[in-house]
Amino acid sequence: MDFKDKVVLITGASSGIGKETAIQFAKKGSNVILVARRKQKLEQISDDLKKFNIYTMICECDVSDKLQVEKMSKLVLKKYGSIDVLVNNAGFAIYGSVFDLTTEEIESQMATNYFGMIYCIKNFLPSMLEKNSGHIVNVASVAASFGLPGIASYCASKFAMLGFSEGLKHELKGTGVGITVVSPIMVRTDFFDHPSFKKMPKYSPLSLSDKTVTKAILRAANSPRLEIIVPSVVRGAVWMKNTFPYLINPILGIAFKKQLNSKTKN
């Protein structure tokens, strides 16, 4: 797909990966729809994108709210008729044991990370199918393949995203509409600004820049693959975990449980 003059909708577009994705698609000549809860942030980004001589549209929307997504999609479809690329990027995590997290905190992660994706796909997929073209990019995480203590509910939302995407990919075969999941390791964004991460080291030496992940998102929008793991070398770790779970799972469990216990004591 040549991205020039294409219509790209990005959720979670107010910062981090979403903001950088908007910039990179704009550089390619795409018309960008910015979706997030923070309207002021979106307006700033929209102003920054004017230099690329593309059209932008701002949609203040909480994707965890089904009615807000329906309203947002109607406005978008009224203006553009359809979109060419849907980037489901909105997401967050709350760090803590399942015992310590409230039910509402667990539900809120699933509502944004998983159901937010569902709501957007349900509202925009019909118009994509009608014109027999388009691509859905779901931004997940390597946590879609590893269940880890401290972020169990976040892992669950990303496991769900990957499983849903795989099932939908089979359904979309032959329709002209594609779907690809981008699964990065830790990324240096404001993702870790949530108070629950306060006593934890924010980034590891292996953490990625938002630009690196955005490059993968643009590749994904043209890819026939189900999943692109960033960096690609981590695919080996996923293979090891799936092939030798009795060896890998205990190692990961001990390492991350130690970190969780350390936070609890502090």
Image (spheres, grey):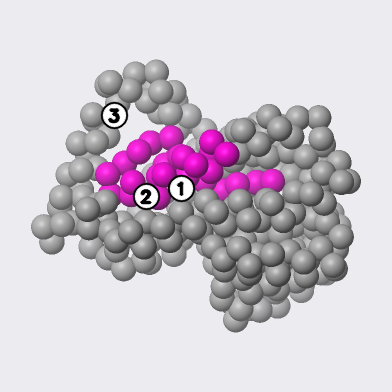
Vertical order, 143 against 262 (above or below): above
Amino acid type shown at disc 3: Asn
Alpha-carbon distance for marks 1 and 3?
19 Å
Start-end of magenta stretch: 136-164
Image quadrant where one finds the N terminus: top right
Q: Are the residues tagged 2 and 1 within 8 Å (C-beta)?
A: yes
Marking on residue 138: none
> Does the magenta segment cover residue 145?
yes
Q: Which residue is mark 3?
A: 249
Question: Going by the image, does 252 lie left or right of 193?
Answer: left
Q: Which residue is mark 1?
A: 157
Dot 1, crowdedness within 10 Å: few (<14), some or many (≥20)?
many
> Does the magenta segment cover residue 21?
no
Amino acid type shown at disc 2: Ser
- As helix, strand or loop, the secondary structure at mark 2 comes to helix
Question: Going by the image, does 202 lie left or right of 126?
Answer: left
Name the mark nearer the viewer: 1 or 3: 1
Amino acid type shown at disc 1: Ser
Q: Which residue is mark 2?
A: 153
